[in-house]
Image (tube, rainbow, N blue to C red):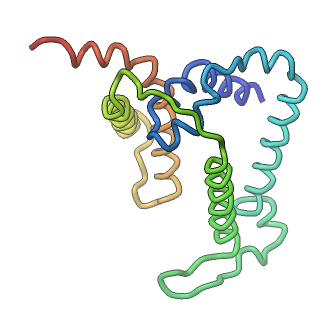
Amino acid sequence: MPLGILLALAFHLLLRDALILHLPRFLRERFAGFRGLDWLGYLRKNYLVSLISLLIVIVSHLAWESFTHVEGRGVQLFPQLKAHLLEGPFQTRLYALLQKLTSVVGAAAMVVYIWRLPTTRLAPPKTSLRLFWGLVLLLSLLIIGVRLVVGRGVEFHNSYLLSIVLISAGLTSLLLAPVLLPAWTMLLARPK
């Protein structure tokens, strides 16, 4: 739970406003209302609600994962979840299909929610979108490179583990980019 609070603080205090500014216009205008939100003040006033919400998210996520991953307790208790559903190139097991279907349903719900958000005109950022997202891409590649050299290698044959590495590198880069962007901009603007 402390990690969840730490991640929320990092997002709201370091990333949120810079990310909103550098989103494509469609998203920037929908998330503009969240810029400048006093999340620390909100957390202080709604401490208990925030902790209970975080706890619900953590418990429900772990509970659902137990039914959608082969090592999960739910899959062990209900062996029917290991049943093969399709043959050939689309062969899959029920637990894996549940994971994919609920991911698609969750993504669709987020798209509908974002689509329905009110829009607010917001001027584009002073730094270019290409500069920001180029930095995110560069940092992601550096993080993946460090992982290849220092840590356990990236397992390219396992799409699940590969997706975790890519998502982790991307999210870490998003946290670092707003902090490093001013230095990146100065470095690129330096006369040669």
Left of 16 or right of it: where is 95?
Answer: right
In this rendering, does residue 21 appear at all? yes
Answer whether residue 70 is visible to the viewer in this image.
no
Residue at 68 percent across and 62 percent down: it is: 105
Residue found 63% across the figure and 23% down from its top: 12
Q: Quadrant of residue 128?
A: top left
Identify whether 182 is placed above or below 157: above
The one of 178 and 86 positioned closer to us in this rendering: 178
Residue 156 placed where, x, y %? 40, 56
Identity of the residue furthest to the front in this view? 121
The x, y position of residue 183, in whole percent, is 33, 13
* Residue 15, x across and y down, in percent: 54, 25
Q: How many marks?
A: 0
Vertical position of residue 63 compared to residue 16: above or below: below
Quarter of the image where the C terminus is located? top left
Q: Residue at x 84, y 67 (%)?
A: 77
* Left or right: residue 84 compared with residue 78: left
* Residue in the image at 36% along x and 14% along y: 182
Q: Position of residue 87 (x, y in %)?
A: 56, 88
